[in-house]
Amino acid sequence: MEKLLIEGGKPLKGDVRISGAKNAVLPILAATLLAEGPMRVANVPHLQDVTTTMELLGRMGVSLTIDEHMNIEIDTSTIEEFFAHYEVVKTMRASILVLGPLLARFGKAEVSLPGGCAIGSRPVNLHLRGLEAMGADIEVKGGYIHASCDRLKGAHLVMDNVTVTGTENLMMAASLAEGTSVIENAAREPEVTDLANCLIAMGANIEGAGTDTITVHGVKELKGCQYSVLADRIETGTFLVAAAITGGHIKLKDTQPQILESVLQKLDRAGASITSGHDWIEIDMHNRRPKSINLRTAPYPAFPTDMQAQFTALNAVAEGSCTITESVFENRFMHVQEMQRMGANIKVEGNTAIVTGVEQLKAAPVMATDLRASASLILAGLVAEGQTVVDRIYHIDRGYECIEEKLVQLGANIRRVPH
C-alpha cells in the first residue's frame, strides 16, 4: 500500500490539463453493451475505476483494446456471459450500471449488489423498481440481482429520489425498449447528459437530458460509434480549490466552466479572481487568505456533494466562520476527524459542520476514508506547516488521474512512497 508525503506552504502556479470525467466514462463504458458494432471511447481518464470496469466487461467476454492515448475500443460481439462478479463489483458501486444494458439487449443479467465508498446508503431499489415497471422479472438472492425479460416495454417512471446512476441505468434500458419511456424527477447532472449524447450518437432517440424529465423513444438496435468523454468537473473543482487554498494562480485547460457554475460562484465569494473561456478557467488568489463561505450540497445544478470535502479544507484555513450542510449523503464528514488532527476547528452537528478558520494547519499523519475525503486531505496538506502523510490513498486513484504528478507540475512538494 502506498502513501503520499506533502510539504505544505507553496502557492500553486502554472497550467494543468483536466482529464475525462470519471462519472461520465463509467456509464458510457456500460452503454457499449447496447451497441451492435464496435465502439471507440476517447478522452478516457487513467483511473482504477476505469480499470475495474474494463475487467468487469472483459470477464463477460467483451473484447477490449486500449492505445497509448487511453482510447478504448470495445466489441461486444464476443460476449459469453451476462454475469457481474462480486469480486469486481464490491470495489465500485458504478458496476450496477451494466444491469440495464444487459437486460435491454440480451434479456438477462446477474449482477452482484454493489460496493464502493462508505459514504452512506445508496440503495439500488429505484433501479430495480424502474426495470420491473418496464416488464423485467427481478429477484434478489445470495447478494445478486437476477433479472430477465423478453423485450422491455416503455413505462412512465417517477423517481422517488434524484439518483444519477438510477437515471442512467433506466435511460440505457429504455433506449432499446419497445415504446416510449418517461423518467420524471431525473438527475440533471452533466454526466447524465453526456451519457445521453453518447446514446444519441449510437442511434438512440432521447429528449430532455439535462432537465428533470427525460423522454426515451425505444429503438430496435443501437450501433457502435466514436465518442469523446466530457471533462471532469470534480477534478476541475478540486484543482481550483488547491489554487485558492494555497493563495496560488493557475490555469486549467480542456475543461468546461459552464458545468461548474455553483463552484465558481463560491470561489468568487471566497475572494478568488476567476476568468474563463470556452474550454479553460483561470483562478488567481493574489496570495490572499480565502474568506469563509457557507454552503449546502444538493443535486445538480446546486453545489455538488463531491466538492463538499474540498471546500471543508478551504474553510478550515479561511477567514471567519461558516456552516457546511450535507444534504445528499448521511455519512460524508469522515474527513473532519482527520482535519481536526491537523488543527482544524470543525464541529459536526448532524448533517452540518460548523467551521471556524484557523491561520495555519499543522502537518499530521492522516488516513483517507473515501475518494473525495482523500482529495480534501491532500488540499489540507498543501497548506499545513511540516510534512503531512496521507495514508490509504488507493481511494484517490479511483477518481483522480495522476494527481500528485499534476500537483508537482504546479509547484507542489508532494510525492508517493511505498509503505
Image (cartoon, rainbow, N blue to C red):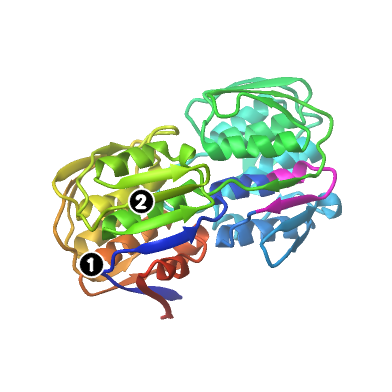
Q: Along the polypeptide, which appears first: circle 2 or circle 1?
A: 2
Residue 56, by quadrant, is bottom right
What residue is rendered at 27% in x and 70% in y?
Answer: 8
**Of circles 2 and 1, which is in front?**
2
Q: In the image, which disc is placed on residue 283? A: 2
Disc 1: CA contacts within 10 A as few (<14), some (14-19) or many (>=20): many
**Residue in the foreground of this view, choosing between 246 and 329:** 246
**Residue in the foreground of this view, choosing between 100 and 209:** 209
On screen, residue 104 versus residue 277, left or right, reads right
Kindly tell me whether residue 142 is visible in this rendering: no
What residue is rendered at 32% in x and 60% in y?
Answer: 379
Q: Which residues are magenta?
A: 30-42
Q: Is residue 33 magenta?
A: yes
What residue is rendered at 62% in x and 41% in y?
Answer: 140
The x and y percentages for residue 289 are: 19, 54
Q: In the image, which disc is placed on residue 148? A: none
Disc 2: CA contacts within 10 A as few (<14), some (14-19) or many (>=20): many
* Quadrant in which the C terminus appears: bottom left
**Residue in the foreground of this view, choosing between 362 and 418:** 362
Q: Circle 1 sits on which residue?
A: 384
Q: Is residue 3 magenta?
A: no
What residue is rendered at 30% in x and 49% in y?
Answer: 311
> Which residue reaches farthest bottom?
418
Kindly tell me whether residue 277 is visible in this rendering: yes
